[in-house]
């Protein structure tokens, strides 16, 4: 039974819970999202395997997940990037944000999400149980595609992308209050 780290609004640990239970009850827990950028400035996307317990078949950033109890978040993010995409690269912490949204299958995503970045031109070797397909996409193309068909993208990715692009100084990225 996989456990997630329950946190308060400042990311202070307050306990643990079984992962699916935390998502059914909408309990705030620690998570991470990894953005991978190529040296040419393209973003690595994955389409989640359709059999995933939520958001199956949707496009998202290179890797997402939850640190295990006692595991540093950056270590968990790097571990999952290796497991899901076959990439190993140093990560840079960009920012964290909290969100709460309803998902499919009567689940709720309520996460304190740490967003990390790595630059890599490494070979992609995805785990077929996790990743249905993958692609390198320019930020401009991605923003256009997301505006045209937002339902094809995971909700957390739609929330974090504008802030990430603004932090990276990507042309055309929205300017966010307080950034």
Image (cartoon, helix red, strand yellow):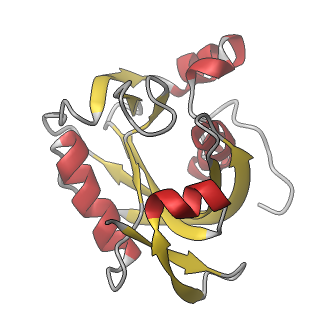
Q: Is residue 132 left or right of residue 142?
A: left
Q: Nearer the viewer, residue 34 or 21?
A: 21
Residue 155 location, quadrant = top right
Residue 78 seen in render? yes
Q: Quadrant of the N terminus?
A: bottom left
In this rendering, is residue 145 above or below 113?
above
In this rendering, is residue 123 above or below 112?
above
Q: Residue at x 21, y 37 (%)?
A: 121
Residue 90 seen in render? no
Q: Residue at x 22, y 56 (%)?
A: 89
Residue 37, image x, y percentages: 38, 40
Q: Quadrant of the C terminus?
A: bottom right
Residue 15, image x, y percentages: 53, 86
Q: Nearer the viewer, residue 84 or 179?
A: 84
Count of residue discs? 0
Residue 174, image x, y percentages: 76, 38
In this rendering, is residue 126 above or below 102?
above
Residue 125, image x, y percentages: 13, 34
Q: Is residue 172 left or right of residue 126?
A: right
Q: Residue at x 58, y 36 (%)?
A: 105
Q: Is residue 132 left or right of residue 64?
A: left
Q: Residue at x 28, y 36 (%)?
A: 130
Residue 136 location, quadrant = top left
């Amino acid at each position: 039974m996989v456990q997630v780290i329950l946190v308060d609004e400042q990311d202070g640990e307050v306990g643990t819970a079984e992962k699916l239970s935390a998502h059914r009850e909408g309990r705030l827990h620690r998570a991470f999202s990894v953005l991978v950028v190529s040296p040419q400035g393209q973003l690595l996307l994955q389409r989640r395997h359709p059999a995933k317990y939520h958001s199956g078949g949707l496009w998202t950033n290179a890797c997402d997940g939850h640190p295990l109890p006692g595991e540093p978040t950056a270590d968990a993010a790097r571990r999952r990037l290796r497991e899901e995409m076959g990439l190993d690269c140093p990560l840079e912490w960009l920012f964290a944000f909290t969100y709460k949204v309803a998902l499919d299958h009567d689940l709720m995503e309520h996460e304190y999400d740490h967003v990390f970045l790595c630059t890599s031109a490494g070979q992609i070797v995805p785990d077929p149980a996790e990743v249905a397909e993958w692609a390198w996409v320019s930020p401009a193309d991605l923003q256009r595609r997301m505006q045209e068909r937002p339902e094809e993208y995971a909700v957390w990715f739609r929330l974090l992308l504008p802030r990430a692009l603004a932090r990276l100084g990507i042309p055309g990225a929205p300017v966010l209050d307080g950034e």
